[in-house]
Amino acid sequence: MLFIKINLRPNRSLQRFGLLIPSKTAFMIAIAPYYLETQKESEVFQHAFKNKLPLLIKGPTGTGKSRFVAYMAHELDKALITISCHEETSSTDLIGRFIIKGAETVWQDGPLTTAVKEGALLYLDEVAEARPDIIVAIHSLTDHRRELFIDKLGLTIKAHEDFMLVASFNPGYQKGFKELKPSTRQRFLAISFEYPDAKKEIEILMNESGINKDDAKKLVAIGQKIRNLTELGLAETVSTRLLVDAAKLIESGLPKRLSVNVAVVQPLSDDADTIQALNDLAGLMI
């Protein structure tokens, strides 16, 4: 089964997805999520929505891709369906399936079909992780046709005027194994997310955690230092998300070095020598 998260504004309704999710499972975007603009990405998103063009967001883990999509859903006052893709996510999970209801067999729309019909924003998080049949299923939604074919019903559905497809992926993750084909990438507009500069990252940490500026500066300095340590061969580097987690722990009273250890160092590696080196580095900076 796929993981699905539905984000709805107040007074919105979205049909239940039968076996795909428990009934009444919904998350409300009552107020705008905090998001700090870095490169006019909001303007690009708005124009993509206006012109009914799909958008691909590229960038490393923890650079705010999902937060940005949630922020834009709030700004546009649209329902948001987020699907975290993985290798077991199938087109059936997204499009829909026949289910037994009493003595009848009835069709139940999946989240993709519901978004297409009702004009929601559909966010495929880490789309490169999805199975090939998912990519095939969305192709006709990413060009001039803007339609979804449901082979089990023999139906073709035209997308609602407000429907928008947004996808994200990390181009550096397991390079060579989890890349999008050029034929798929070229169906999307694309914007790249990188880690923010020091000034903006400090502001993010302070807004997200309430930490003081001096400690925020130290955490950002640690993050930038580790990101430059390419010789360690880390599969992933320090994301803004990890720094925010460390800031929250510090602000809540956990010792600073312990906070950095559990929120930043330990998630990056299981190698004892690497962990020791990172802890020694961080200890000198905070």
Image (tube, rainbow, N blue to C red):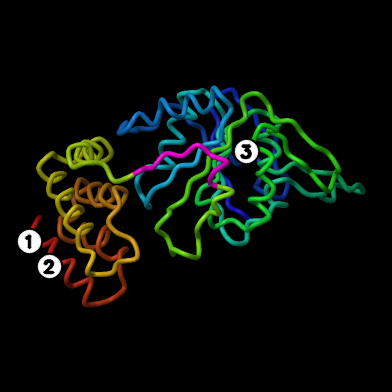
- Circle 1: residue type: Leu
Please give the residue where the numbered disc 3 appears in the rendered image. Answer: 142
Number of numbered discs: 3
Q: Quadrant of residue 214?
A: top left
**Residue denoted by label 1:** 284
Q: Which residues are magenta?
A: 185-193
Circle nearer the viewer, 1 or 3 = 3
Q: Is residue 15 magenta?
A: no
Marks 2 and 3 sit apart, C-alpha to C-alpha, by 49 Å
**Element assignment for label 3:** loop
* Amino acid type for the residue under numbered disc 3: Thr
Q: Earlier in the sequence, mark 2 or mark 3?
A: 3
- Contact flag, marks 2 and 1 (Cβ < 8 Å): yes
Task: Single out the residue that lies furthest toward the right.
Answer: 103
Rate crowding at label 3 as few (under 14), some (14 to 19) or many (20 or more) other CA atoms within 10 Å: many
Say left or right for 123 vs 272: right
How crowded pointer 2 is (Cα within 10 Å; few <14, some 14-19, many 20+) is rated as few
Instruction: Using residue 162 as the reference point, say whether residue 214 is left or right of it.
Output: left
Q: Point out the frontmost of discs 2 and 3.
A: 3
User: What is the distance, in whole Å, between disc 1 and disc 3 at their CAs?
Assistant: 50 Å
Q: Mark 2 = which residue?
A: 280
Q: Position of residue 188 (x, y in %)?
A: 54, 39
Instruction: Check residue 188 for magenta coloring.
Output: yes
At a point 47% along the width and 65% down the height, the residue shown is 176
